[in-house]
Image (cartoon, helix red, strand yellow):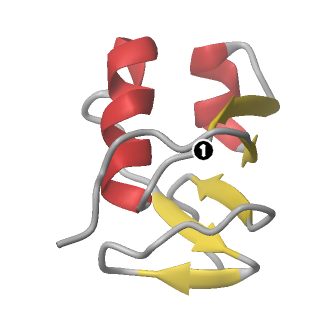
């Protein structure tokens, strides 16, 4: 079983739209996390104003829909809901 403790090092997280507005940040540097579930929990703990806002995570420019391991050096982006036409 994989240990889910925080790793040493950092991730860079890019935030867009309402997510950047709510946090006051466009780019965050956060401790390394084992996976996207751990990252999301960490973000909600630090930025409770994000609770209730739907967003999608992208890891290395690929949209993800399930918990995904996060290796050091991956690019993570939080994408707010968007509509197109």
Q: Is residue 22 left or right of residue 75?
A: left
Seen at 35% across and 26% down, the residue is 44
Vertical order, 77 against 22 (above or below): below
Q: Is residue 72 left or right of residue 43?
A: right
Q: Residue furthest left?
A: 1
Q: Is residue 2 left or right of residue 73?
A: left
Residue 13 visible? The answer is yes
- Judging depth in this view, the residue of 9 and 60 nearest the camera is 9
- Judging depth in this view, the residue of 50 and 68 nearest the camera is 68
Q: Which residue is mark 1?
A: 32
Which percent across, then down, holds residue 47? 45, 16
Residue 83 visible? The answer is no
Which percent across, then down, holds residue 24? 72, 13
Which percent across, then down, holds residue 76? 68, 60
Q: Is residue 43 left or right of residue 85?
A: left
* Residue 52 location, quadrant: top left
Quarter placement of the N terminus: bottom left
Seen at 61% across and 71% down, the residue is 58
- Judging depth in this view, the residue of 27 and 83 nearest the camera is 27
Mark 1 residue element: loop
Seen at 64% across and 73% down, the residue is 59
Which percent across, then down, holds residue 70? 55, 66
Classed neighbour count for the residue bearing mark 1: other residues with Cα under 10 Å, few (<14), some (14–19), many (≥20): many
Vertical order, 27 against 7 (above or below): above
* Residue 29 location, quadrant: top right
């Amino acid at each position: 079983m994989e240990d889910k403790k925080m790793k040493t090092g950092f991730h860079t997280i890019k935030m867009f739209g309402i997510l950047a507005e709510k946090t006051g940040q466009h780019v965050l540097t956060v401790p390394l996390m084992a996976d996207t579930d751990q990252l999301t929990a960490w973000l909600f703990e630090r930025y409770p104003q994000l609770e209730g806002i739907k967003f999608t995570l992208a890891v290395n420019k690929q949209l993800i829909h399930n918990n995904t391991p996060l290796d050091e050096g991956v690019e993570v982006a939080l994408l707010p809901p968007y509509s197109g036409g």
